Image: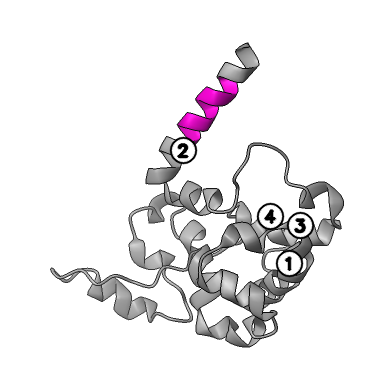
Amino acid sequence: MLDLNAKKWFKQAWEQESQGNRKLRFYSSFKKSIGLEPYLTECSFKTARAVAKVTMSCHGLNVETGRFGANYSKKHLRCCPSCTDLDAMELILELPDEHDPIIEDETHFMKECPIYENIRNDLESSLKDNISLDRWDLIFEMDKVKKISNIINRMLKLRHPKNELEFL
């Protein structure tokens, strides 16, 4: 009985928190149930690692690294380096009419950034369609994990050349 109440409480807390938290909102878009994801035990380490980098925000994208330490309030440091002139963005953000920068987050990385377009073109059409519709729950299903992990690895290698993220 206690276990059932704890799960119910946790699920309610999760749903409430994920509505107002950007990280949890992305995570909850594909993580629909509490428990271990099958790809973590049924796939190779390389496959699981690639998917986990994106799903757990361990990817080294500016949405994460731009908020470390003293940089927390400097929104321009979270911009996509391929889509934004960071020097100009710092000046634009100081203007009274604040300009919304292109934040380098998981969604921008996976579906919008033009620098990865050639890599995304290698995806089969059903995966492309699911990405364009933000159907992350379908992208990270077990039968698609190997394909998407190869794409993620290629994109991360382009984003972070020379094993810059080897520690991940």
In the rendered image, which residue does mark 4 sit on?
Answer: 52
Q: Which quadrant of the rendered structure holds the N terminus?
A: top right
Q: Tell me whether the residue at label 3 lies in contact with that at label 1, contact meaning CB atoms closer than 8 angstroms.
A: no
First in sequence: mark 3 vs mark 2: 2
Q: Which element type, helix, strand or loop, lies under badge 1?
A: helix
Mark positioned earlier in the residue sequence (3 or 1): 3
> Mark 2 or 1 closer to N-term?
2
3 vs 4, front mark: 3
Residue 150's x, y, as percent?
75, 72
Asked which secondary structure carries label 3, the reply is: helix
Q: CA distance from mark 4 to mark 1?
A: 9 Å
Q: Amino acid at mark 4?
A: Ala
Say few, some or many: other residues with alpha carbon within 10 Å of mark 3 (under 14 / 14 to 19 / 20 or more). some
Nearest the eye: 165 or 18: 18
Q: State which mark lies toward you, 2 or 1.
A: 2
- The x and y percentages for residue 88 are 30, 80
Q: Nearer the viewer, mark 2 or mark 4?
A: 2
Q: CA distance from mark 3 to mark 2?
A: 24 Å
Task: Please give the label number shown on residue 149.
Answer: 1
94 to the left or right of 137: left
Residue with the mark numbered 3: 142
The residue to which callout 2 is attached is 15
- Choose the circle earlier in sequence order: 3 or 4: 4
Location of residue 52 by image quarter: bottom right
> Which residue is found at the position 29% from the left and 70% from the top?
100
**Label 4 crowd (10 A; few <14 / some 14-19 / many >=20):** some
Residue at 70 percent across and 80 percent down: it is 124
What is the magenta range? 6-14
Residue type marked 3:
Met
User: Which badge, 2 or 4, comes first in the chain's sequence?
Assistant: 2
Question: Which secondary structure, mark 4?
Answer: helix
